[in-house]
Every structure is written in C-alpha cells, then in structure tokens.
Image (spheres, rainbow, N blue to C red):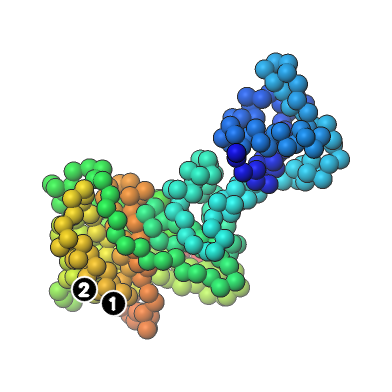
C-alpha cells in the first residue's frame, strides 16, 4: 500500500488547476506529475473521495475540478511548480539532518537534473539545507542544532573506465571542465564571478619544491550587507590512480601560502583494492585532516557523478598574505585571466 504524502495531492491539483483544458486527460496527468502509478492512484482517489475533483470515463479518462472553493484548490492557484519541487525534495530528506546524496535524492524525487539543481540551489541560498560530502555531493536539512555532513570512508566502486594508461596531465582538462560546470553548480561558488584555469605548468620565479597547483579557481566574493569584496583562491592538486600517497598531501598543503582552500583530488581504480591501499587511503585522509586540506576522489574524471568529497578543507589559523596572493596571480594566472580579474575588481 503506497504512503499518501501531502505533496502528492498538491502536485496532482497543481496540474489539474493550471491545465489549459477544463477536463484533464488521465495520461497527461501521469506524464506531468511524474508520480509512480500507485502514488498517483492514491492521490487521485483521495481527492475524488473528498469531492474536490471528479472523474469521467470518456476519452480514455479525464479529471476536472468539482469544488472550486475548496482550500486546496485555492492554494493550488497560488502555487508554482518550483514550490512543490521544494516540498518534494524536503519530504525525501531525513528529519534528523543526516545527509543524502544528490544522485539518490534526484532519483527518488523523479526530477530532471535541471529542475533538481535549480530548487537545490534555492534551498541552499535561503538556508533551508546545507551542502555535504559524498559521491556527487549531498545535502542535509539545517535544523536547530545543525549537523555537519559526516566525513565518508572510501567505498569500493566498479571501474567505469580503464585508468591504467592515464597520465596525470590527461586529467587536467576534463577536471577543469567539471570544475567550471558541475562542481561550480553543486558547490555553489558560481554565485560569484570566478576564473578557473589549468595552472600545472606555471612556475614560481622564487623556485621551491612545490610549484603551482594543477587547477586554480580565483573568485570574487561580495555580500548583501557587508560593504566589501574578497578575492578567494581555491586550489586542486591532482593525482592519477596509483600515484598518490602521504607526500601528495604535503604538495597540496604547500599551496596554503597563497590559497584559502586546498584540495587533494585523487583518482581511484576498482574492483580490486588491496588492504594495503585501503590503509594508505586512511593515512592520506588523516594527513589531510592534520594539514587542513580537503580530499576528494573520482574514478571517471569527466563524470562528476563519480566524484566523492571525503573531507572539506578547514579554515587555516590565518589567511594567506595578500602579497603572496598577488604574486601567485601574477605568475600563475594567464594574461586573459588576470585581465578578467582586473575588470571585476574595477567594477
């Protein structure tokens, strides 16, 4: 027996009330609401029982409003599809603030990616939900005592491509594309103007063991009530499958002298993962915590749904020296990128 949720009824009414025809074909309603058959039947039967809508057998089955002054009908005339999508997403989120992955949640809600992304962004912006970790990202309810999304453990995944011949340099361009699109949307830094570039081959004129990060984001944050703007640097150090260990963390941490947030992004290969590699991952995770570096993994670099955030970078005890930030931008960011940043800063 399906569980009749309030938004099932409201979703059905929204489409009946706003349908261009007085009599709504049964098939149109099934396609538009995207409810499974049992949920749709339960919602429709409850509305018919309450004499809010009626049903006729003609033309393959049609529905119409029979009680125009019913509170639910009046409410439906003022609702939008987006408000119902908000209800649907919230109805599928745990009440206790536990995180749920975006991929799973979107599937459960039967929403298209564009529909889901739009509403999720709205929920994040108004403080209803928070962004957590997990493969493909996750969200969670913000309750009176907000619960931080738990740091996950690496889970075995089936390989989606052969990474045995991949070089680190082969990861840069597809990773940058993911950063500029899916990650910018899911991690919400596309709220601000930003420049994202491949910086792996740039060299610090001062020298040093650890040079430029592989991928760099420079974003200009502004605020509604605080009269200032902040330039924030986010860096990613990429490592291909089998070419990462605790020293990789030191390489990522070395960028904190000019970056506000640093990530180590490692490629993993399955199905067979040795116990030694599992232990190595735990050592890397511990080192990332100690150095306040973020950690993410991916199996297929061009597919964001294979990305998993295991650890978010923690705020350092002090911000990078502005002189170091300025110098980094001078030697690491392309002329086009510097020009765009200057235009943004001079607005």
Q: Are discs 2 and 1 less than 8 Å apart at CB?
A: yes
Compared with residue 228, is residue 114 higher up or lower down, i.e. above or below?
above
- Point out residue 42 in the picture as x, y percentages from the top left corner: 66, 36
> How far, Cα to Cα, is label 2 from label 1?
8 Å
Q: Pointer 2: residues within 10 angstroms few (<14), some, or many (20+)?
A: some
Q: Residue furthest left?
A: 165
Numbered disc 1: secondary structure? helix
Residue occupying the point 75% across, 25% down: 55
Kindly indicate the quadrant of the structure image that contains residue 159. top left
Compared with residue 54, is residue 304 higher up or lower down, i.e. above or below?
below
In the picture provided, is 66 more to the left or to the right than 214?
Answer: right
Q: Pointer 1: residues within 10 angstroms few (<14), some, or many (20+)?
A: some
Residue occupying the point 46% across, 73% down: 230
Q: Earlier in the sequence, mark 2 or mark 1?
A: 2
Residue occupying the point 53% across, 70% down: 146
Q: Residue furthest bottom?
A: 317
The quadrant of the rendering that contains the N terminus is top right
* Mark identifier at residue 291: 1
Residue occupying the point 30% across, 46% down: 302
- Point out residue 195 in the picture as x, y percentages from the top left corner: 38, 59
Per the image, the residue denoted by label 2 is: 250
In the picture provided, is 245 more to the left or to the right than 117?
Answer: left
- Point out residue 71 in the picture as x, y percentages from the top left corner: 82, 45
- Point out residue 82 in the picture as x, y percentages from the top left corner: 63, 46
Q: Residue furthest front?
A: 1
Numbered disc 2: secondary structure? helix
């Amino acid at each position: 027996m399906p569980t009749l949720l309030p938004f099932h009824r409201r979703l059905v009414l929204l489409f009946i009330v706003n349908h261009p025809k007085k009599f709504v074909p049964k098939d149109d309603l099934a396609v538009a609401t995207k409810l499974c058959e049992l949920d749709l039947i339960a919602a429709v039967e409850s509305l018919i029982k309450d004499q809010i809508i009626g049903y006729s057998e003609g033309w393959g089955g049609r529905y119409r409003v029979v009680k125009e002054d019913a509170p639910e009908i009046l409410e439906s005339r003022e609702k939008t599809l987006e408000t119902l999508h908000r209800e649907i997403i919230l109805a599928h989120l745990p009440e206790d603030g536990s995180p749920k992955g975006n991929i799973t949640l979107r599937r459960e809600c039967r929403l298209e990616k564009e529909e889901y992304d739009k509403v999720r962004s709205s929920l994040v912006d108004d403080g209803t939900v928070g962004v957590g970790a997990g493969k493909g990202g996750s969200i969670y309810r913000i309750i009176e005592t907000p619960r931080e999304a738990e740091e996950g453990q690496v889970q075995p995944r089936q390989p989606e491509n052969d990474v045995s011949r991949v070089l680190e340099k082969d990861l840069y361009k597809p990773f940058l594309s993911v950063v500029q699109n899916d990650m910018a949307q899911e991690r919400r830094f596309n709220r601000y103007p930003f420049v994202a570039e491949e910086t792996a081959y740039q060299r610090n004129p001062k020298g040093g063991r650890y040079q430029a990060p592989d991928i760099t984001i420079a974003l200009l944050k502004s605020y509604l009530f605080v009269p200032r703007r902040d330039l924030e640097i986010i860096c990613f150090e990429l490592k291909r499958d089998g070419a990462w260990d605790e020293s990789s963390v030191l390489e990522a941490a070395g960028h904190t002298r000019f970056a506000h947030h640093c990530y180590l992004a490692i490629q993993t290969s399955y199905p067979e993962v040795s116990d030694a590699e599992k232990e190595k991952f735990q050592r890397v995770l511990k080192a990332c915590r100690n150095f306040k570096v973020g950690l993410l993994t991916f199996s297929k670099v061009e597919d964001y749904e294979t990305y998993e955030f295991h650890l978010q970078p923690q705020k350092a005890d002090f911000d990078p020296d502005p002189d170091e930030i300025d110098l980094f931008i001078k030697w690491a960011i392309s002329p086009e990128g510097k020009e765009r940043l200057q235009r943004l800063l001079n607005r």
